[in-house]
Amino acid sequence: MQSSYADNTESMNDVMKEMFISDGMPAELAEMMIGEIPPEQERHFMK
């Protein structure tokens, strides 16, 4: 079965949030910062 485009992409917001948290930032603060990016400006990249 062939995977879809959505299965092969990842939100840059999710990656940035994971990086912030792994660097010790509280999850709530990381989510608040990422939440300020409007959905139409959200970027995706290929995995």
Image (spheres, grey):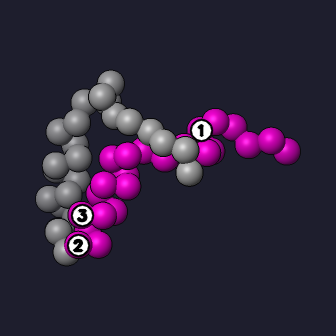
Q: Nearer the observer, disc 1 or disc 2?
A: 2
Q: Distance between the Cα atoms at labels 1 and 3?
A: 24 Å
State the image coordinates of residue 33 (x, y, percent, origin top left).
16, 49
- Please give the residue where the numbered disc 2 appears in the rendered image: 23
- Please give the residue where the numbered disc 1 appears in the rendered image: 6
User: Viewed as shown, does residue 10 lie left or right of 30?
Assistant: right
Q: Give the range drawn in magenta.
A: 1-23
Count residues near mark 3 (Cα–Cα under 10 Å), then give few for <14, some for 14-19, many for 20+. Answer: some
Determine whether the residue tagged by mark 2 lies in a helix, strand or loop.
Answer: loop
Question: Which residue is at 33% across, 63% downward?
Answer: 18
Q: Is residue 19 magenta?
A: yes
Q: Is residue 42 magenta?
A: no
Which mark, by number, is residue 46?
none
Q: Mark 3 is on which residue type? A: Phe
Question: Which residue is at 42% across, 44% downward?
Answer: 11
Q: Is the magenta stretch mostly helix, strand or loop?
A: helix
User: Viewed as shown, does residue 43 lie left or right of 36?
Assistant: right
Q: Which of marks 1 and 2 is nearer the N terminus?
A: 1
Q: Are marks 1 and 3 in contact (CB under 8 Å)?
A: no
Which mark, by number, is residue 20?
3
Q: Mark 1 is on which residue type? A: Ala
Which residue, as the protein is rendered here, is positioned at the far top?
Answer: 40
Determine whether the residue tagged by mark 1 lies in a helix, strand or loop.
Answer: helix
Q: Quadrant of residue 8?
A: top right
Q: In this view, does 19 lie above or below 32?
A: below
Q: Do the residues labelled 2 and 3 touch (CB within 8 Å)?
A: yes
Count residues near mark 2 (Cα–Cα under 10 Å), then give few for <14, some for 14-19, many for 20+. Answer: few
Q: Distance between the Cα atoms at labels 2 and 3?
A: 5 Å
